[in-house]
């Protein structure tokens, strides 16, 4: 009888080991897969689009060509390495999903944990785009030191009405760095509430260390969408 009881207990232990054994490798595999997926996601998200948008300018009595203005605010989530030549791409489609046009914009660099804005435009012939897909290409990292955007300070930002065109945006930018720069890019993002509705970029050359430069941004669009605020971003170019 004791022998039989021992066999039953042994069988229960074996069954318990088998159940535990089944759960352990499965859990381990899931954990390993999850960790690998997290690593892949983390690697892919080191260049992150934190905001993007587009504005469609249809044909009108003055132009038989439709345009798409697009932009993306992109962040380098890496703590140590800069990103060289970040690229965003935009694909415009009609209501049936047919591609009307595609374009890309390449930036200069993004310092670790820094954010920059890239903008561009494209024409879509005589058909206005219904949807626009904006993506960021896989980043190329470098250990080369990159100028951070916090060395620039913008002040005196003003929208100045124009008689026949969109209001232009004026302001001043102060460069607080110690090394002269070949150029900078100044981007205005027009917002309605929390949503960005338009963006435009202008460029200044030969920026001296410690200098303050005036600038103006003249949107190329025939008109600006309704907006209640404007954010200005500056980066080395």
Image (cartoon, grey):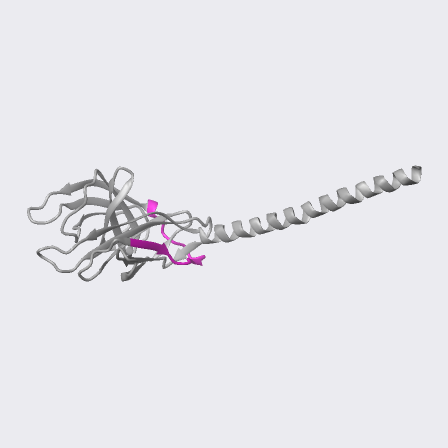
x then y, percent, for residue 208: 26, 52
Question: Is residue 124 depicted above or below 161 in this figure?
Answer: below
The part of the chain drawn in magenta is: 132-150
Dividing the image into 4 quarters, which one contains the N terminus?
Answer: top right
Tally of numbered discs: 0
For this rendering, which residue is in front, 176 or 220? Answer: 220
Question: Is residue 37 depicted above or below 155 in this figure?
Answer: below
x then y, percent, for residue 194: 29, 38
Queried whether the magenta region covers residue 140, the answer comes back as yes
Dividing the image into 4 quarters, which one contains the C terminus?
Answer: bottom left
x then y, percent, for residue 127: 20, 59
From where the camera sits, is residue 204 visible? Answer: no
Queried whether the magenta region covers residue 116, the answer comes back as no
Residue at 72% across / 47% down in the picture? 21
x then y, percent, for residue 163: 6, 46
From where the camera sits, is residue 114 visible? Answer: yes
Q: Quadrant of residue 123?
A: bottom left
Looking at the image, residue 77 sits to the left or right of residue 177; the answer is right
Looking at the image, residue 108 sits to the left or right of residue 227; the answer is right
Q: Quadrant of residue 180?
A: bottom left
Looking at the image, residue 157 sits to the left or right of residue 97; the answer is left
Residue at 32% across / 53% down in the picture? 179
Residue at 42% across / 54% down in the picture? 82
Residue at 74% across / 46% down in the picture? 18
Query: In this view, which residue lies farthest toward the left?
Result: 163
For this rendering, which residue is in front, 228 or 118? Answer: 228
């Amino acid at each position: 009888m004791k022998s039989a009881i021992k066999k039953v207990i042994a069988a229960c232990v074996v069954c318990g080991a088998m159940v535990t054994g089944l759960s352990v490798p499965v859990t381990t595999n899931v954990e390993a897969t999850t960790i690998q997926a997290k690593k892949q996601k983390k690697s892919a998200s080191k260049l992150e689009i934190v905001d993007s948008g587009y504005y469609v300018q249809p044909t009108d009595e003055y132009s038989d060509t439709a345009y798409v203005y697009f932009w993306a605010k992109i962040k380098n989530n890496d703590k140590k390495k800069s990103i060289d030549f970040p690229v965003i791409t935009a694909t415009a489609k009609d209501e049936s999903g047919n591609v009307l046009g595609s374009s890309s914009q390449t930036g200069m660099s993004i310092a670790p944990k820094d954010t920059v804005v890239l903008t561009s435009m494209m024409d879509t012939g005589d058909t206005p785009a219904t949807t626009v897909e904006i993506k960021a290409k896989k980043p190329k990292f470098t250990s080369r030191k990159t100028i951070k955007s916090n060395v620039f300070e913008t002040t005196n930002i003003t929208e100045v009405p124009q008689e026949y065109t969109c209001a232009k945006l004026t302001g001043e930018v102060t460069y607080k760095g110690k090394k002269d720069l070949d150029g900078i890019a100044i981007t205005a993002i027009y917002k309605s509430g929390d949503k960005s509705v338009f963006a435009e970029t202008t460029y200044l050359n030969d920026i001296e260390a410690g200098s303050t430069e005036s600038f103006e941004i003249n949107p190329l669009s025939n008109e600006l969408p309704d907006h209640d605020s404007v954010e200005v971003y500056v980066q080395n170019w």
